[in-house]
Image (cartoon, rainbow, N blue to C red):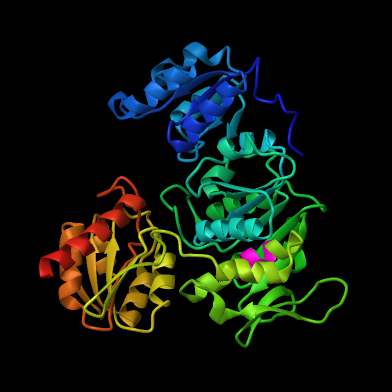
Amino acid sequence: MALKADAFGAGERVVVIGLGRSGAASCDVLRSRGATVFATDEKDPSALRGVLGELERSGATFVPPAEIERIAGELTSAILSPGVPLTNPIVRRIQAARIPVYSEIEVAYRICAAPIVAVSGTKGKTTTTALIGELFRHAARKTRVGGNIGNALIAETAVATADEWVIAEVSSFQLEAIRAFKPRISALLNIRPDHLDRYHSMEEYAEAKFRIFANQGPGDAFVGNLDDPRIGAMAEGDGASRIPARAYWFGLSPRRMTTLYVRGDRITYAPPTGDPRPVEIMPVSEIPLVGEHNVANVLAALLVGIVAGIDPQKLREGVRGFHPLPHRLQPIATQNGVLYVDDSKSTNPGSVIAALESFDRPIVLIAGGKSKRTDFRAMGEAIDRKAKAAVLIGEAADEIAGAILAAQIVRAASMDEAVATARSLAREGDVVLLSPGCASFDMFASAEERGETFGRAVASEAALRG
C-alpha cells in the first residue's frame, strides 16, 4: 500500500544521489511536494552545467560529493538514482551517517495512488512495458507508462490518480534498494547474462531481479516465463514458496503449469479457475513484431492484461495495432534489396542471439561496443550459424572476434565505416543488422545516439551511391 499523500513532502530533507534523468525528476517531484532537496553527483561540474541550472530554478541545492558530511546530520533520507550502486562511496558515507537510502522507484511507489504493473527482465522489458501500456489504453484503462523505459517513474506516479494504472519498466539496478515497493502485478520475462561488470555472479544478478515480487502478497499477481530456467524453477516444489503472490505462467508451448501458451500457431489461454476449456486469443501471425523472443514478450503482455481483467478481444486488437519501438529490431530502410535493421538497444549477447534468430536470410552483423564483462562464446556460435559476416566496432571488437570461428570478420573504426563495409558485403536479399551486444559508452553517449548514427550512416551511404 502506498503511503499517505504527504510522504516525502514538507519537513523532509532529502539528498538525491545521481543527476541523470531519474535523479533530476526526483528533485523536481520532491521540491513540488514541499521537501527541502539537496543533490549530488560525481560527474565533472562542467558536464552538469545544464542540470545545475534546472536545480537552481527548482529550488534544490547542489552539494559537491566532498561536502556531503556537511549536510548529512540534517538529512531525513537519500534517494538513489538507478545508475548509482549501493557500493558507491557517497552512498556508503550517507549510510554511515545512519540516513535511510531509497531507490527512486521506492519513493515513486510510496507516493503513488494508482496500482502499479512492474515489468523486468534482461531483454524485452521495454517492448513489453510499452505493449502493456498500449493494451491497457486500448481497453479504455487510464494508463501512465514510466521507469527504465525512458521517463522517470516518479514523474508519473506523482500525478497518478487512484482510477489509473501505472505501467513501470524496472531494472535490476532500480530493484536493489527497494524496501516496500509492491506492484499489483509483477512480470519477469527472462534472466540472461548481463551487467556482470556490476554483479559478482549470475546468482547475484538473478536475486536482484527476484526482488520485483519480494513484497507482494496473496492479493497481488506474478506473471513469469516458464521457459526461462531460473524463473521456471519457481513454478513448483520448493521454488514456489519464494513467490508470495498468485503466480501465472506463460510459455512458447503448452505445459502443465502454463496459463498462456502457443498451440500450433494460436496463442491460447487455459483459465486456472472456472471453465477449464482453453480459449484462443489470437494467431501468432498477427503479431507485428519480428522474432520468437517477441512472441514471448507478447505472451507476457497478454497474460498481464488477462490478469487485470481485460477482455481478450480488446487484447488481440491492441497487439495488432502495436508498432516496433525505435532501436529494437526496427527496420529503417531497404536499399538495392538489402534490409537495414536498427537493434541498437541490444546491449547483451542474449539480445544479439535473439536478433540473429529473427531472420531467415543472410545477415551482415554490426556488433561491438563497451563490454559488460559478459561471455561472448554463445554469441559467437550464433554469429557463425546465422551471419555471413560480422563488422566489429568499439572496445570489445577483439573479444567478440575471438568467439567467432567461421563467419568473416571485418573491423571498423566508426559507424560510417561499419555501414559502408556492411553495404559492400551485403547482397540483394540480405539483412544489415546493427545489434551490438554491448553498451554504447565507448563511442556514443547512449544506445539511442548509436542507433541514430547508424540511421544517418545508412541514409548517407544511399545518397553517396545515388
Say whether residue 16 is magenta: no
Q: Which span is picked out in magenta? A: 299-304
Instruction: Where is residue 20? Give x, y as percent.
Output: 43, 35
Residue drawn at x 50%, y 29% is: 91
In-front residue for pair 281/90: 281
Q: Say which of 33 and 251 sits in front.
A: 33
Q: Residue furthest right?
A: 274
Q: Quadrant of residue 316?
A: bottom right
Q: Position of residue 221 (x, y in %)?
A: 75, 57
In this rendering, the count of numbered labels is: 0
Please name the residue shown 17% across and 59% down the image: 416
Q: Is residue 377 left or right of residue 237?
A: left
What residue appears at the point 42 percent right and 62 percent down from the top-left corner? 328
Tell me the quarter of the image containing the N terminus: top right
Check the picture and name the quadrant holding the C terminus: bottom left
Residue farthest to the bottom, as pictured: 264
Q: Main secondary structure of the magenta part?
A: helix
For the question of whether residue 182 can be seen, the reply is: yes
Q: Where does residue 362 sit, x and y in percent of width and height?
A: 30, 82
In this view, 270 is above or below 202:
below
Along the horizontal axis of the image, is 247 left or right of 42? right
Left or right, 450 with reference to 208: left
